[in-house]
Image: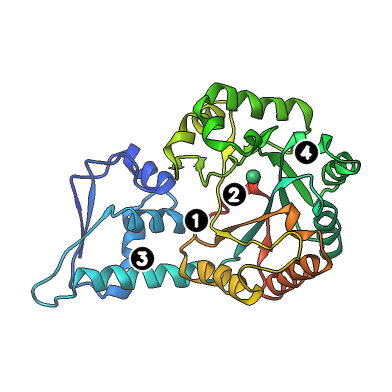
Amino acid sequence: MLKLKGGLCGFCAVTLATLGFYSCNNLSNTVMGSQKVDSLVSKIEELIVEKPTLHAKWDSLRDNKLVFHIDSLNPIPIKTQKQKLKDSLRREFDKHPKHIYLTFDDGPLVGSRAIDSIARAKNIKVNAFVVGRHSTMGKYRLRDLNLYIENPLVAVYNHSYTHGFNRLQTFYRDSQKAFDDFKKNEDNIAFNSKVARLPGRNIWIYDEEKKIDIASAEPTADLLFQDGYKIFGWDVEWRLNSLTGVATVPLETVYQRIVNFMNNKSSKEPNNVVFLMHDDMFQTRQGKKLLSDLIDKLIAKGYKFEFMEDYPIKY
Ligand SMILES: [Zn+2]
């Protein structure tokens, strides 16, 4: 049978359901080994009294907020219990839609126009993290930025004004200056909403989540978050040689990587995979064909294409 250690306060009950057990130090869940393991999910549901979500259960397992016990009469190793529970939750997630976020960084560049027209042709949502300064470089770059802004299928987000002139260590050394660079971009471009990605950094800050890859950029990310921004990194990245259109990793391989992230729930949020590409990848005929073919495979798989401002979609 199931036991609660300590008792369940009203605050915790809500916290369990909405925040995935954050800040509930006085509470632990006891799952007795004599339970049939496959029924663990429904038993956890009993513990989370206020609208349990699949994501809340997943977070509680991932963050080791559940306490498992071995029953001497019917011993099931804790590792097995956890694996069974994880598999069971995976199967639950698989009953829901899977969401893919195609994100294109560093536009407007040669290649942006192709992304704009492919999004229209396939009728899918895509996300452009743009660098305002690039719209001043070259005859057609302002045109390309405006194509994005005028296309309802393209969400346009902030990737800083200068991209730190690609000297990222220097850029992040002065966090106020880096933050001001993002604000300059905001002053110049009508963004869909306050969503940002930091140049060269796989940093996530949204809701209660925070994941930092390189600490030197954290103060800049914090300033943006305090200013109301959500900051997103990526789960899977793909690169092509921009001049030849040759992929560093074959299309089939990167497609399979996305599918594996979806199936194993190994992305930052289960059933939500953020996929990173760069605008300059799609300036050749071969590059454009690869993008088009990849999108066709994702459509055929039944994935839903989403805007980053809606991330993560939870159940
Ligand atoms: Zn970039």
Q: Residue at x 21, y 68 (%)?
A: 78
In the shown orientation, is residue 68 left or right of residue 274?
left
Marks 2,1: beta carbons within 8 A? yes
Amino acid type indicated by mark 4: His
Whether label 3 lies within 8 Å of ligand 1 gets the answer no
Q: Position of residue 122 (x, y in %)?
A: 82, 65
Tag of residue 269: 1
> Which residue in the structure is indicated by mark 2?
311
For this rendering, which residue is in front, 258 or 207?
258
For this rendering, which residue is in front, 68 or 206?
206
**Mark 4–mark 3 distance (CA, rounded to whole Å):** 53 Å
Front position among marks 4 and 1: 4
For the N terminus, the image quarter is bottom left
Res. 302 image quadrant: bottom right
Q: Earlier in the sequence, mark 4 or mark 3?
A: 3
Whether label 2 lies within 8 Å of ligand 1 gets the answer no
Amino acid type indicated by mark 1: Glu
**Mark 3–mark 1 distance (CA, rounded to whole Å):** 22 Å
**Mark 2–mark 1 distance (CA, rounded to whole Å):** 9 Å
**Mark 4–mark 1 distance (CA, rounded to whole Å):** 32 Å
Tag of residue 134: 4
In the shown orientation, is residue 132 left or right of residue 20?
right
Tag of residue 42: 3
Front position among marks 3 and 1: 1
Q: Residue at x 39, y 48 (%)?
A: 20
Q: Earlier in the sequence, mark 2 or mark 4?
A: 4
Quarter of image, ligand 1: top right
Marks 4,1: beta carbons within 8 A? no
**Mark 2–mark 4 distance (CA, rounded to whole Å):** 27 Å
